Image: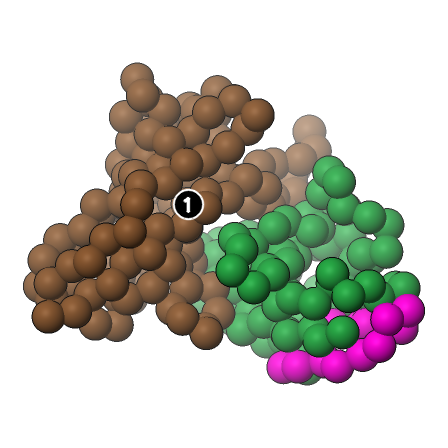
Amino acid sequence: QVQLVQSGTEVMQPGASLRVSCQASGYTFSTYDIHWVRQASGQGLEWMGWMNPDTGRGGYAKTLQGRVTMSSNASISTAYMELSSLKSDDTAMYYCARLSAWGIRYPRAYGMDVWGQGTTVIVSS
Amino acid sequence: EIVLTQSPDTLSLSPGERATLSCRASQSITTTYLAWYQQRPGQAPRLLLYGASNRAPGIPDRFIGSGSGTDFTLTITGLEPEDSAVFYCQHFGGAPYNFGQGTRLEI
């Protein structure tokens, strides 16, 4: 079945760098954008950025620019999200999600229809 | 940057009742660029509606989306206990693709 499987829990030191992986299966990886979303405990969803596995094109939330990098390895159908200079505020659940588009005419309709199970990231000294 | 504001913050209703959740955008959004998600406790979000009113596969017809411009609504009829969750709207009208702050629905 179509799914995204993320890497496991990470406990990180402040100032360190983090890499979370997101492996896709059940569909052609390169044909869908991957977005990353995070959620601090008890808080709402924060959109972090996106990347296209085919072109490598993407974009990041301004609040994270300079610290976040999104990439992929199509040969293993895996997307990556790297976050540097970690702070305690980065403690959160991190999700990857596939963006699907519907309709054949512009403007198309969009929604994130497949989500990873989430990766818990704890930043603490 | 488009900001989405959801209301109310929390909604407490009984089984069988109807819930009405609002999502207001800081500027007009093309209808096809509005999506709704449901997040149950301890779970990843689940896509409910795309294009403001189109149900994602497997979503029951109790979930109804409407609206245009800056005002969008998610209506849930015949509430069931399993509908207890936080609901988020999200836009795709240009990055950043922000979410609303969420509405908690308690059944």
Residue drawn 52% across the image and 22% down it: A26
In this rendering, position of residue A69 left or right of residue A116: left
Q: Which residue is mark 1?
A: A96
Please give the range of residues in magenta: B9-22
Q: Quadrant of the N terminus of chain B?
A: bottom left
Q: Quadrant of residue A22?
A: top left
State the hue of chain B: green
Decide whether residue B21 is among the magenta residues. Answer: yes
Decide whether residue A112 is among the magenta residues. Answer: no
Tell me the element at label 1: strand
- Chain for disc number 1: A
Residue A52 image position (x, y, % from top left): 39, 34
Residue A119 image position (x, y, % from top left): 35, 51
Q: Is residue A59 above or below residue A32?
A: below
The answer to which of A12 and B65 lies nearer the viewer is: A12
Residue drawn 11% across the image and 66% down it: A14
In this rendering, position of residue A97 left or right of residue B24: left
In this rendering, position of residue A95 left or right of residue B8: left
The answer to which of A92 and B63 lies nearer the viewer is: A92
Residue B96 image position (x, y, % from top left): 43, 58
State the hue of chain A: brown
Residue drawn 59% across the image and 60% down it: B39
